[in-house]
Image (cartoon, helix red, strand yellow):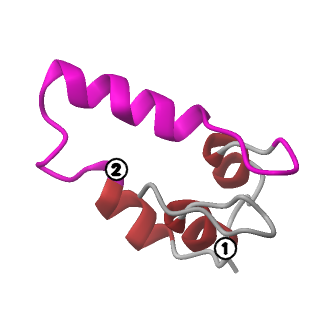
């Protein structure tokens, strides 16, 4: 999760969101590994971190709308 693309600044979850892999994004965010208080801080940072263009994971998911 700490990897980021050199060109876009996207982390793997952002890449999955851009490719509309909603099941993968949901699985990562719901993982049992993130069940403590410190993990919630990590998830908040992950959701609100920005890529090179200033987009957050939250914005990427929210802007996609319904899949057809």
Residue 4 x/y as whole percent = 60, 62
Q: Which residue is located at x 88 percent, y 49 percent? A: 53
Residue 65 x/y as whole percent = 73, 58
Q: Of 3 and 25, which appears nearest the observer?
A: 3
Q: Quadrant of the C terminus?
A: bottom right
Rendering quarter of residue 42: top left
Q: Which residue is mark 2?
A: 29
Q: Of 56 and 22, which appears nearest the observer?
A: 56
Q: Is residue 31 left or right of residue 9?
A: left
Looking at the rendering, the stretch of residues picked out in magenta corresponds to: 29-54
Which residue is the extreme one toward the right?
53
* Mark nearer the N terminus (1 vs 2): 2
Task: Using the numbered discs, state the Cα–Cα distance from disc 1 to disc 2 in whole angstroms.
Answer: 20 Å
Q: Which residue is mark 1?
A: 67
Q: Is 32 part of what is drawn in magenta?
A: yes
Residue 37 x/y as whole percent = 18, 19
Q: Is residue 40 left or right of residue 52?
A: left
**Residue 32, label in figure:** none
């Amino acid at each position: 999760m700490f990897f980021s693309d050199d060109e876009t600044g996207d982390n793997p979850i952002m890449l999955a969101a851009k490719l509309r892999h909603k099941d993968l994004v949901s699985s990562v965010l719901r993982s049992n590994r993130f069940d403590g208080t410190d993990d919630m801080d990590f998830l908040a940072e992950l959701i609100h971190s920005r890529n090179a263009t200033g987009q957050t994971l939250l914005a990427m998911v929210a802007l996609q709308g319904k899949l057809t």
